Image: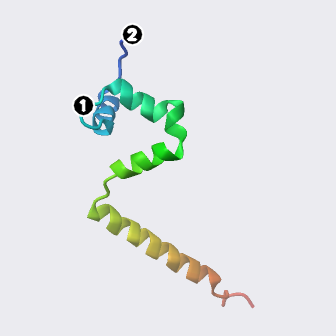
Amino acid sequence: MAVKTITIDMEAYETLVRARRGNESFSTVIKETLGPASRTAAALLRRLDDLVVGEAALDDLERVVASREGDLIAAERPDEDRG
């Protein structure tokens, strides 16, 4: 198989490292992430299975949802300033 050397910055490299499962090669990570097979429902489910969400992130999401619910309730109230 032919190979090609590329240069990436450290942020891109760290992103690849985090996306890698086990001893996967970077080539596999790139193909699974960017290739045609990455746009399937099965690929999405695989990525969701790998997703780890911490408690702090969940707390932040709950706060955002609660604030938006408050905004919706306020928007539904009649404007008392109008005459």
The percent position of residue 52, horizontal first and vertical second, equals 31, 54
Q: Residue at x 51, y 79 (%)?
A: 70
Horizontal side, residue 78 vs residue 60: left or right: right
Say which element carries label 1.
loop
Display coloring: rainbow
Give amino acid for label 1: Asn
Q: Which residue is mark 1?
A: 23
Which residue: 54% across, 32% down?
A: 36
Mark 1 touches mark 2? (CB < 8 Å)? no
The answer to whether residue 61 is left or right of residue 77 is left
Rounded to the nearest angstrom, the CA distance separating label 1 from label 2 is: 19 Å
Q: Amino acid at mark 2?
A: Met
Mark 2 surroundings within 10 Å by alpha-carbon count, few (fewer than 14), some (14 through 19), many (20 or more): few
Q: Position of residue 67 (x, y in %)?
A: 46, 74
**In this orientation, which residue lies closer to the viewer: 57 or 76?**
57
Location of the C terminus by quadrant is: bottom right
- The foreground one among 34 and 83 is 34
Does 19 sit above or below residue 73? Answer: above
- The answer to which quarter of the image holds residue 30 is top left
Residue 72 x/y as whole percent: 57, 77
Mark 2 element type: loop
Q: Residue at x 51, y 34 (%)?
A: 37
Classify residue 79 by image quadrant: bottom right
Number of numbered discs overlaid on the protein picture = 2
- N-terminal of the pair, mark 1 or mark 2, is 2
Say which quarter of the image contains residue 81.
Answer: bottom right
- The numbered mark at residue 1 is 2
